Amino acid sequence: MTEKQVRLSWNDPNDINNYTYSWGSFDQWIYDDILSASGAIYLYFKNGKLESWQDF
């Protein structure tokens, strides 16, 4: 999915972090998990495309 597609289906994230390393950069979008009081869902984008995700 592209960033635009994610925004259309999930709305805006609660927070966005940008990371840059010697091998490249990526964006981490954080969504509060409405099903869990303490959890969150992390989406990782590289070049504007969703690469992976984590949920806690």
Image: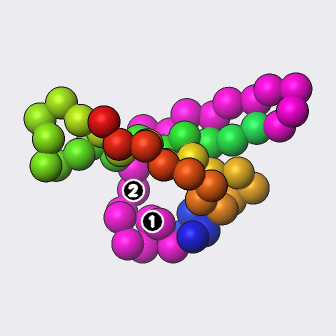
* Left or right side of 20 for 51: left
Asked whether 19 falls inside the magenta stretch, the response is: yes
| Circle 2: residue type | Asp
Q: Earlier in the sequence, mark 2 or mark 1?
A: 1
Pointer 2 and pointer 1: residues touching (CB < 8 Å)? Answer: yes
- Percent position of residue 27, x then y: 62, 42
Q: Measured along the vertical axis of the image, is residue 11 above or below residue 28? A: below
Element type where label 1 sits in the image: helix
Q: Quadrant of residue 50?
A: bottom right
Query: Can residue 30 be seen?
Result: yes
Residue at 62% in and 55% down: 51
Q: On the picture, is 12 further left or further right than 4?
A: left
How far apart are the two marked residues, 2 and 1, measured between alpha carbons?
Answer: 5 Å
Residue that appears at 60% across and 68% down: 2
Determine whether, in the image, residue 52 is placed left or right of residue 56. right
In-front residue for pair 26/8: 26
Quadrant where the C terminus lies? top left
Question: Percent position (x, y) of residue 44?
Answer: 57, 47
**So how many labels did they put on this image?**
2
Q: Which mark is residue 35?
A: none
Which numbered dot is residue 12? 2
**Which region of the structure is painted magenta?**
5-24
Q: Is residue 29 above or below residue 48?
A: above
Give the camera-side residue of 49 and 17. 49
Q: Residue at x 38, y 72 (%)?
A: 9
Rendered-image quadrant of the N terminus: bottom right
Most extreme residue toward the right, as rendered? 22
The reply to whether residue 14 is in sight is no
Which structural element holds mark 2? loop
Q: Which class describes the residues within 10 Å of circle 1: few (<14), some (14-19), or many (20+)?
A: few
- In the rendered structure, find residue 7 and report the number of the disc placed on it: 1
| Location of residue 24 by image quarter | top right
